Each structure stands twice: as C-alpha cells, then as structure tokens.
Image: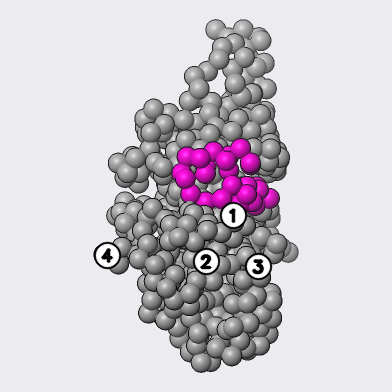
Amino acid sequence: MLDEKQIQEIVQQVLREVQGQPASAQQVGGPPKQAAAPVGAQEGVFADLDAAVKAAREAQAQFSRLPFQERGRIIEEVRRSMYPHCRALAEATVRETGIGRVEDKVTKNQLALDKSFGIEDIETRCESGGYGIMLEEMAPFGVIGSITPVTNPTSSIINHMIIMPAGGNTVVFNFHPSAAACCAETLRLMNRAYIEAGAPANIGTTIDKPTIKSAIQLMDHPDIDLLVVTGGPAVVERAMKSNKRVLAAGPGNPPVVVDETADLELAGREIVAGAALDNNLLCICEKEVFVVETVADRLIEAMQKNGARLLDARETAAMEKLLITSEDKVNKDCIGKDACLILSRIGIQVPPSVKLAICEVGADHPFVRHEMMIPVLAIVRVRNFEEAVAGAKEAEQGFGHTALIFSRDMERITYYAREMRVNLFAANGSCATTLGYQAEGCTALTIAGPTGEGVTRPRTFVRNRRVVINHALHTT
C-alpha cells in the first residue's frame, strides 16, 4: 500500500504533466545525483547502433513533451554554450580530415549557431467558423537518422542539432568515418549543453566507430522515422531503398555568369572569396565562371587584386595533369587542399595569402565539367549573355543546386534564375550569401535538392497534424 508521501508525489507528478512541465530532473534527462551514469548514457556516443537508437527514442519521448517555449529556451542556451568551442572544433576538423581551412571552418561553425532557425520557424494555424475550429499543429517526426559528410562535419552536426530538435525530434548520426572523432566531440559538447539547459540526455546519438555498414544499418533501422542524407550519389541511391521518407542532398557544380553590366570590382572580390571558401569544399561554392569577353580581362584583373593566382597555358596544362586522372576523375588527394600547396606541386611557389588559382579554359574542359572541390577555378570567355547562360546550364548538369550571377540588369538576373531552376541562387554576392552569411536568411548545411525540400530548416522536420473540433467553440 502507498503511504501518504508517495501519494502526494504521484499527485504532484500528474499535475506537472497535465500542465506540460517536466516531472523531475531525472525525467528530463538530468544526470542522476546518486551515481555517475555511463558516458554514452549522457553524451550520446554508444558502442552499437541499437543502443544509440534506443537512447534517442527515449529522449524524444521526453523532449517532445516539454512546453514549446521551453524547447525554444533550451535551444537558445545551447547556442550560447557552444560558441566558445567553435575554434577548437575547427582546428580538430582540419587536423583529422586534412582538408579545408581552420578560419573558414570557424566561420561555418559560428554561422550554424547564429543562423540556424529555432522554434520561431514553426507555426500553428487555426481556423474558426460556424461548425467549430480546425487546428493544424506541427508535430515531430520522432527519431531522425542523419548521415553527414566529411566536407562540413562539425558545422553539419551543430546545424542538425538545432533545427531537428526545434521540431521536437532527436537525431541518430552516422558520421563520415574520416571525420568521426571531431564529429563525436561536437556531439558530446552539444549533448552536455542540452543537459545543462534542462533537456533529456541523448538529444543526439551516434556510434563510436561509424562505417559504411553502420550507415546502411541506420537507413534500414525500424525505429528511425526519417532519413537525412548528405553525401554522394551512391549513398543517396541506397537511402532511397530504405522504404522511409528521405531528405537527400546531392552534388552541385555551381556556375557563375558575369555580364558586361556587372560591377567588376565587386564580382572579382566576391567570386574569389566564395571559390576559396574552405578550399572550395562546399557544394555551393563557385566552380566555374562564364564571363562576357568584353569584360573578361577586367574581371581577371579584379580577381588577381583580391588574391587569385592566374595560370598561363603551360601552367594550366600542368594543373590539369595533376588534378584530373587518366580515368577522367578528380584527384582525391587534392580535394580541399590549400591553393599554395596545390600550386607548389606544379612548381609554383606562392605565399599562404593566395587562396585561389584561376585559369582560362574552354567550356568542355574537365575543370568545368567536374565538381572539383579544389581551389582552382575555371574561367570561360563567351561572346554574350545568352552564350553564358547556355554554358552555365550545361555545366550545372541539371543538379538544380546553386547558380550565381553578377549583373546590374534585373531582367537578365530574372531570366537566368528562371532558366537555372536551382535551389540556391545569388545575384551580386558570393556563394556564402545563399547560406545567410552577411546576407538575409537562415543557414542550412543540408540542401535537399534531389528530393525537393531545398534549404532544410525546423519546419522541414515536422509534419502537419490536423485537429478538428466540431459543434463547439464555433463562431456564432
């Protein structure tokens, strides 16, 4: 039989649950005071996938019951807690992966914290009439499986650990094996921040040794409600066979058009900044430029003034031999490496301040056809705007990812945007503006082009649930 004290505890617990408040620190995942819990139970890193999914499922059941505004408060505290770790995580990423630039990875981490939308992106709609009311609420999917890339490892974790929990979800990650350590550390830090803010443990989970096999197991796991895949065509194709809803980010080969009306000083500065960003690792980065020939020399001059190194015909041929294999593939050993290092491999010594090499080639050159992810940018001269657009469309290959233009002619900007039909489009700014950097809009580290969602944000990770109450609360 229950004594009076136990009855009072049960009554108080029921009242708190009815009012939408956590019943106790233990129920919302706060660390038990009586004994230290295993590391995995608090920080999200587990030895096997079943344990990681189970922990995320239990956390989601608790987290989704928190009041909506409380969820928002927690996420804002997590942002503030993570900010001091941005540089250390960037340094760890470059150290582990050997690609990219520390300063740019710091920027990406900070951008993910600053401009990943939270609960403000989720709206409930209500209609009232003579019959009663209709309420459409945004409900969580549950547990999301996220497969992340080596190109944007820590910033992707930060972004996903904000926008997915904002919708009331938890996440099970399969990190790229080449970035497993820095990603796991990011996850640990974020889980600690969530716990300290009052959330359950294990808002995000993973396994300690991610592999291709574990990624497939995650895709097929019965307790994963939604898949988010950022990777190459093979992993996206495999995810599509999982019989789950999939949000997939595919490849990109973003072209830039520069016409004769453009502000060439602006174009030169912004194109260099965008193409050099994190050594061109991002799929949104400028990959090739189509410039009207009457202004091509002035554009190239502006790019050189902003730190680009122009290659002559002999150097361009040597660079092609280095970067393109005999099988017409991109040399993986050069992906994401510093421009000064790549230039040194063809006998050109430049200071570290040179972040981009540029070269003039034809529209059918491998540097135009391939998504390089290397700080070497192809420039193609064209006769007019129409030829530039045609070249850009062919180079983009219908990926529908990103396209950019520099022009003062609004009709041309509009025409180009409609012709390209991409998820991300920028006029008179670098690729970084499409992610909200020194521009309006939110940040997304997963651009779901193949499956049509485009920029992912909290509202991407909720489903519409309709509630109808008839013959009550109606308008008279």
Q: Amino acid at mark 1?
A: Pro
* Tag shown at residue 171: none
| Residue in view at x 48 percent, y 49 percent | 99
Q: Which residue is mark 2?
A: 357
Quadrant where the N terminus is found in the figure: top right
Q: Is residue 242 visible?
A: yes
Query: Residue 352, which numbered label?
Result: 1
Tell me: residue 130, above or below residue 70.
below
In this figure, which residue is indicated by the disc labeled 4? 326
Element marked by disc 2? strand
Q: Tell me which label, 4 or 1, sits earlier in the chain.
A: 4
Picture coordinates of residue 34 (x, y %)?
A: 59, 11
Q: Is residue 181 above or below residue 119?
A: above
- Amino acid type at image mark 4: Ser
Which quadrant holds the C terminus? bottom right
Please, what secondary structure does the residue beneath circle 4 have? loop
The span from disc 2 to disc 3 (Cα, nearest Å) is 11 Å
Which secondary structure is most common in the magenta stretch? helix
Q: How is the image coloured?
A: one colour
Q: Which residue is mark 3?
A: 306
Taking the magenta stretch, the answer to whether it contains residue 113 is yes
Query: What residue span does the magenta drawing correspond to?
Result: 86-114
Position in image of residue 192 (x %, y %): 60, 30
